[in-house]
Image: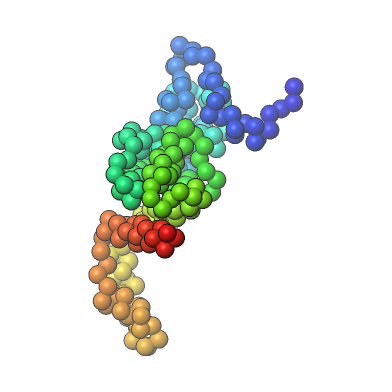
Amino acid sequence: MAARTKAEGAALLWERPEPPKRPAPEPLSRERIVTAAIALADRDGLEAVSLRNVAAALGAGPMRLYGYMESKDELLELMVDAVYGEMNAAGAPKGDWKTALRTLSHRTRDASKKHPWFVELLGGRPQLGPNALAHLEAGLAALSGAKGFDDIDHVVTALGTVNAYVVGAIRSEASELLAQRATGMTEKEWQEATGPYIERLIATGRFPTLARVVHDAKHPPADVVFEQGLDCVLDGIAASVKRAR
């Protein structure tokens, strides 16, 4: 029999049965493996996740894990889907389409704060796990049938726009945390260290708009910045719907 291709393996991950349970030396399951992997990533970062390290955390040999998944990439897919499962546990979002999308956006941001590695695995090809698809369905359903969203292509575009903002925003927040780890400086300490340089540039008169940002902008906390940006996106979509009528 020919070996299964990578494409076939990826497509079958979510329907592939688990091996029969063995009572010794320690019973395993995909759920236990994924839970251990998430705990490892939460504590030490995504770079610490390997089948060998996860197996060690479970007191099992690495080769046992290959009965449950074929590669680290599949393990990462399962981890992402498990986080979507946590997000879905709150139930279907309520309210009109803007309220529902706001709820889903905050769930994604909250998940990335709980699991900082999560945002590193977002983007690119759509996640196909059952929990990820349920999250996607909730977003599509919030728009489908709402006034002005009769065209399914408009639904897809609107949801994609919101998701692009959310992923970009939480990646920006995550990059600040990574910068703090790399430099050993908090954002305030970094601003104090670079402030004199910025002021010297502003004093040249070449950056008048930047000067306004530095001296006049309010620079609210991250929670407020996220909410304001989300408002801009949702209000923009609502305006485009009105123009299309």
User: Which of 120/135 is in front?
Assistant: 135
Left-right relation of 140 to 6: left
Say whether residue 91 is visible: yes
Residue 13 appears in which quarter of the rendering? top right
Say whether residue 109 is visible: no
Where does the image place residue 189, in percent across and percent down from the top left? 29, 65
Left-right relation of 227 to 60: left
Residue pictured at 55% horizontal, 37% vertical: 73
Where does the image place residue 138, in percent across and percent down from the top left? 40, 40
Q: Looking at the image, is 43 positioned above or below residue 155?
A: above
User: Which of 97/213 is in front?
Assistant: 97
Left-right relation of 15 to 199: right
Outermost residue, top side: 23
Residue pictured at 34% horizontal, 72% vertical: 194
Picture mark count: 0
Where does the image place residue 225, in percent across and percent down from the top left? 30, 60
User: Which of 57/176 is in front?
Assistant: 176
Q: Looking at the image, is 95 positioned above or below residue 239?
A: above
Where does the image place residue 240, in percent across and percent down from the top left? 42, 61
Residue pictured at 41% horizontal, 44% vertical: 145
- For the C terminus, give its image quadrant: bottom left
Residue 199 appears in which quarter of the rendering? bottom left
Q: How is the image coloured?
A: rainbow
Outermost residue, front side: 245
User: Which of 187/91 is in front?
Assistant: 91
- For the N terminus, give its image quadrant: top right
Residue pictured at 32% horizontal, 40% vertical: 93
